[in-house]
Image (cartoon, grey):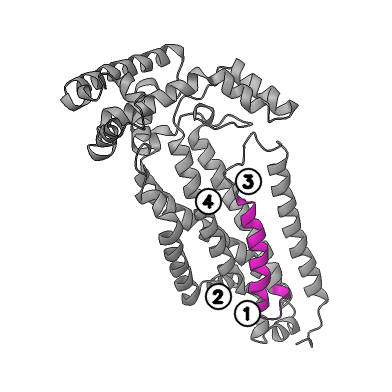
Amino acid sequence: MRILWNEIKKIWSWKILLLLFVVNIVLFFLVIKFHITYFPNGRPGLDSYRISVDMVMKYGADMDEAELADFKKTYQAQVQEADRYLQSRKEFAEAGIRSYEDFLNIDRNNEKQAALRSKVMIEEKVDTFWELQERKRLIGFHDRKEAVFDAYKNHTDAKQQAHLEQSIKGGHYQVYSEVVMANFKDFIIPVAIAILISVVLVVSPVFIKDRAGKILELQYAAKKGRELYKTKAAAGLISTFVVITVLLTVYFVLYARNHTSMFFKVPVHAMIGEFAWYDPTFLQYIALTVIAIYLLGFVFALLAMAFSSIMPNYISLIGIQMFVFGMMMYGLSYLLTNIISLWMPQWVVPTSYSVMAVVAVIFIMLMWKREKKRDILMS
């Protein structure tokens, strides 16, 4: 245990800590901060978020037909409010806009009408009109649910079609805005990238550092010297767990500023555009992405340590890791945010994770066999 602790301490040098801090600060301001600072991002995103919050507070995690009817009543009441607003403005009456229906159907080629619409929406930013636009979109999506499902079914195989039909029979209609889910997906991808880069930076020097310092010959001459390989690997995995846990904690504390906790109990199937093989809540979906990041982190750690034990120098190590990292980033959305997506065959994600884990373990085992047979006179 003392040897393991010493190996862990060797990993966590002040240089590594400084490097992790700098890398995460840079990545935060470049690709993460935007999804926290600017959520909801403008309009109609702001209105979509506000209406969704009201819906969750009033109707709960899911909506039935009676609750949707009540939502439509709210829409109609707001239409009347918009009618009164337009009728109270002389310039609208003169331009032939006397109701919200007229407002929706203005002639965009009519400069006067177009200017009045821009004045309400852009200059004065009247909440009623922005909210009506979003409520109409949500109602329209629900009213066209059968057509929407049919359109999706035309691009699916037999198993996916059967799942969609089962969802329809189960009353799983999408009625809540997609703004919260979209924001989380935009947030978690760069967070995962930052974490994986951090893991690679931490564990990469585990083996190559000793070889560059000509320490291996001394270690392997001792009775227990070769056993240090397994101890170093264990230290690397423990350090990986620490890196992932600390960074996830920091980033999710920042994400909490988006105030999405009221959506935790909303099932994924109730959000527009979300078709999944399974039926988790938003919180359970977040938990799945966290588990996925841990799995990817350990796979990257094992691969990084395997490469560290065979690369002749740091330049070669960085080169091969960037190649693997680039390949992984290409498929990160499929392995993380689309982890339960109906648009991928159900076997793809579990198979991909299984293959990656097996490959990483095989690499480590092969490297261990190599180290056991290694000549201590090798440079």
Q: Determine whether label 3 and label 1 are within 8 Å by CB.
A: no
Q: Which residues are magenta?
A: 309-332
Indicate whether residue 154 is drawn in magenta. no
Q: Position of residue 235 (x, y in %)?
A: 60, 66
Q: Earlier in the sequence, mark 4 or mark 1?
A: 4
- Whichever of labels 2 and 4 marks the residue nearer the N terminus, that label is 2
Q: Position of residue 306 (x, y in %)?
A: 71, 68
Looking at the rendered structure, the kind of residue marked 3 is Tyr
Residue 26 position (above or below residue 44) = below
Q: Amino acid at mark 1?
A: Lys
According to the picture, the residue beneath numbered tag 2 turns out to be 10
Which secondary structure, mark 1?
helix
What number is the disc on residue 189?
4
The secondary structure type at the circle numbered 2 is helix
151 lies left or right of 90: right
CB atoms at circles 2 and 1 under 8 Å apart?
Answer: yes
Assess disc 4: are there few (<14), some (14-19) or many (≥20) residues with their C-alpha within 10 Å of its C-alpha. many
Instruction: Specify the label residue 334 is tagged with.
Output: 3
User: What residue is drawn where x is 36% and y is 23%?
Assistant: 105
Amino acid, disc 2: Lys
Residue designated by label 1: 209
Quarter of the view holding residue 269: top right
Magenta segment's dominant SS is helix
| Mark found first going from the N terminus, 3 or 2 | 2
Disc 4 vs disc 1: which is toward the camera? 4
Give the class, few, some or many, for how many residues have Cα within 10 Å of label 3's Cα (few <14, many ≥20).
some
